[in-house]
Amino acid sequence: MTLGSLARPANRSPLGLLGWRPSERLVFGLIGFVVVLGAWEAASQLKLVKKVVLSSPSLIWDAAITDISSGVIFPHIAVSGTEYVLGLGLALLVGVLLGLSIGLFRRLNYLLDPWLSALYATPTVALVPLIIIIFGIGLEAKVVVVFIESIFVITVSVMAGVRAADAVYHDVAQSFRASGWMRFRTVTLPASTPYLLTGVRLGTGRGIVGVVVAEFLTSNSGIGFYIGLNGSLLQTARVYFGIILLGILGLVLGELVRVVERRFERWRPQIN
Amino acid sequence: MTGTRTALQARGVRFGYVDPTSSEVLLAIERIDLEIPEGQFVSLVGPSGCGKSTFLKIVNGLLSNHEGEIELLAPKAKGSAHAMVFQDAALFPWYSVLSNVSYGLMCQGMSKKEAQARAMPLIKMVGLAGFESKYPYQLSGGMQQRANLARALTVDPEILLMDEPFAALDAQTRELMQAELLRIWAQARKTVLFITHQIDEAIYLSDRVLVMSARPGRILADIPVDLPRPRELHIKRTPEFVALADRIWELIATQLHAHGQPGA
Amino acid sequence: MSRSLNDASGRRVRPGRLGWFDSHARLLYGLFGIVGFLVFWEFGSRAGIVSEYFFSRPTAIIEAGIVEVQIPRFWVDVQASLTEFIAGYGLAIVLAIPLGLLAGWYRRVQYALDPWLNFLNSLPRIALLPVIVIAVGLGLASKILVAFLGAFFAIIIPTIQGVRTVDRRYLDVATSFGASRRRVFLTVVAPSTVPFIVTGLRLGIARALIGVVTGELYAATVGLGVMIKFASDALQTDRLLFGVLLFTLTGLVGVEGIRRLEKYFQRWRPIKAGANP
Ligand SMILES: Nc1ncnc2c1ncn2[C@@H]1O[C@H](COP(=O)(O)OP(=O)(O)OP(=O)(O)O)[C@@H](O)[C@H]1O
Ligand SMILES: [Mg+2]
């Protein structure tokens, strides 16, 4: 027989999408985490970096334990939490309704489009001084800042979502003589859910930024105030502790949105 | 005109997909033994989901970790062992027709200029002259498949692997493309392993039709097609042709009945 | 101008003769929206329906702007803010795109970076301002750093995601032709990641601008943010809103620039009729 045998390289899958092993993800993730933490601590101990700038993991840990056990941090968490929940809740309510209406009604879209584009491109934190003039320095002002920071991403995402449904699905619904409401519920809504959730995810992040900026600029309590105050006292470890608290909040909220996303996205094929 | 060398030899090929979350194994191919002489046109038919695409991917080296052996002819100096014509055209949407067709040559390290010069005659051969600088979205489905075919032919493969290349085409374009493929095949003289769901397409094109069982796949029957070549389209209406088609259809029908509805 | 058969909600628009009004509806409504709102604002303010003290009015804002541009200090502020924005955003682009492509391509690099990227991304990096001021002072550098931190994550995360979600079919095609890893990267991964990078660039503009504004409001001696702060301390809402307007313009120019870039890189995509930006 005249067969030229052909050697074949093993796994040629370029991204290794096939040979995914969960343990590897964990191992390398842990390595990355530990290496950076270790390097940070070592650099700080060896005085390679200024403690007042980068602090160190152990100093941050100490600061966290102190302020948690003395209870100093809890009122700040309560204040920021209230501002955040109220502001974001309001933004969700108004943003979703507004996004749906603009997406559904062409003329409303035309009417508001220039304003939305402009506001979307504005770093709305620049409005914080104006909001302080109008609403004072209390809870209201901060709720408004969180609201304004998060509403546009939510509105714009929902708007895009309403248009995401392929025309052919609308045609299918129409061919079965689905009522307008039926079409909205069975086509528009499912197609726009992923966009809505993207909007919510972006909104939660922007909302946290809103809380921090508002409390930086005017406040006598809240996590942002705690961070700013300790910054001016050169208590860097406490600054990082405050930031980490916000990071944990961000992670928890992100994970929550992901759980909801998975619930709504079961019909979508997994990409890898 | 079948040569004496063997272009493809498969012995005891077996393959299962591993579910990444549950680690369960879905056996796609139970066992395939197969020998294709050089220059032969062989079709593979079988119920949906029986493992046809899977087998082609194994031959093409896109799936590893299979059991059993696959042997192919070593490629010529400037050629390739195998080339695949994918089910949906899978042209890179971001490249023009010319860049797409010359892609395989560039992968072999040829300069862009030379690769494009070599691609031109093939673009002409598949009837796409004048469309070199168009993007895939500017072509019809049939034209995309022609480009797809040209892309596979440029690398001068020892065996051409085709996975339902005409499935997405309308009936008329499909018949035209079948005749085109035979014309191109007569010119290029390649060994072809062709997957299709259409029995008449398989018979019309092939020297041999292999019928597969429902999943997990194995080869149920190996049916020679002794119709004379060159074949005209009206050969599909001759009694010999129809008898062959009936026989193959019956084989597949037993599989559908034995396993209920075929998987989508 | 192309016109789609489906309106915004996917409804079929009745085909028929298009009147002049129909074909210019978008423009007309948009103009009406702008002019109507401005007129309401202006006259509402003059009539006392809208509080001029809080919201000023369009003509007052324009007047304040005309006064402002004649002051040399204003141009110093503009220059400072622009420098901060361009430097921070530019630095983010230069670092985030190559790093993102790399991290997406080398699975293990991504695994190692993942925990930190996730954490740093979900944290409002604006909160690092106090530390950054301690580290590099009140000058331009602190604002550049904040703008950079904002934009960097906005760009790197979609870039990584883009590399990770490359269509399997195209990878199969490249692999079946025996393309080298380098070639797969250059001919498949890079082009199909472009839309993701563009998304990142667009988000990055907003983030970098937020960084500049917040940094200047919080701690700076020059910049448009400082101007806004002074205006607010003096309760000059017209001057304040003129400053905000300048940031809006910067954002709009940036977004438009990205749109052009996108159009250039996406020539191979069919043009969707009636698609909205
Ligand atoms: N990537 C994959 N991961 C897991 N299972 C797969 C994958 N691809 C295919 N399968 C399974 O393997 C079996 C064989 O699939 P294959 O694509 O080879 O079928 P086929 O014969 O080509 O079908 P069709 O004629 O419909 O194209 C199917 O049951 C399918 O569910
Ligand atoms: Mg198949």
Image (cartoon, coloured by chain):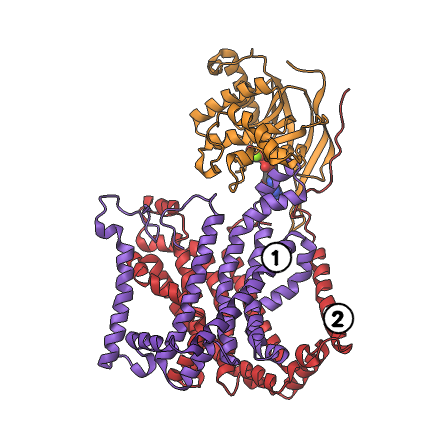
Chain colours: A red, B orange, C purple
The correct choice, above or below, for A100 with respect to A216 in the image is above
Depth check: give the residue in front, C28 or A199: C28
Q: Is residue A119 left or right of residue B206?
A: left
For image coordinates 54% across by 40% down, the residue present is B92
Please state which of residues C33 and A73 is positioned toward the viewer in this rendering.
C33
Q: Is residue A154 visible?
A: no
> According to the image, label 2 marks what residue?
A38
Residue C96 in picture, x, y percent from top left: 60, 60
Q: Which mark is residue C255?
A: none
Q: Amino acid at mark 1?
A: Gly
The spot of residue A148 in percent (x, y) is 42, 73
Q: Residues within 10 Å of mark 1 (few under 14, many from 20)?
A: many
Position of B59 with respect to A253 (left or right) is: right
Tag 1, which chain? Answer: C
Residue that badge 1 annotates: C100
* Chain of the residue displaying label 2: A
Res C134 → quadrant: bottom right
Residue occupying image coordinates x 52% and y 12%: B240
Secondary structure of the residue carrying tag 1 is: helix
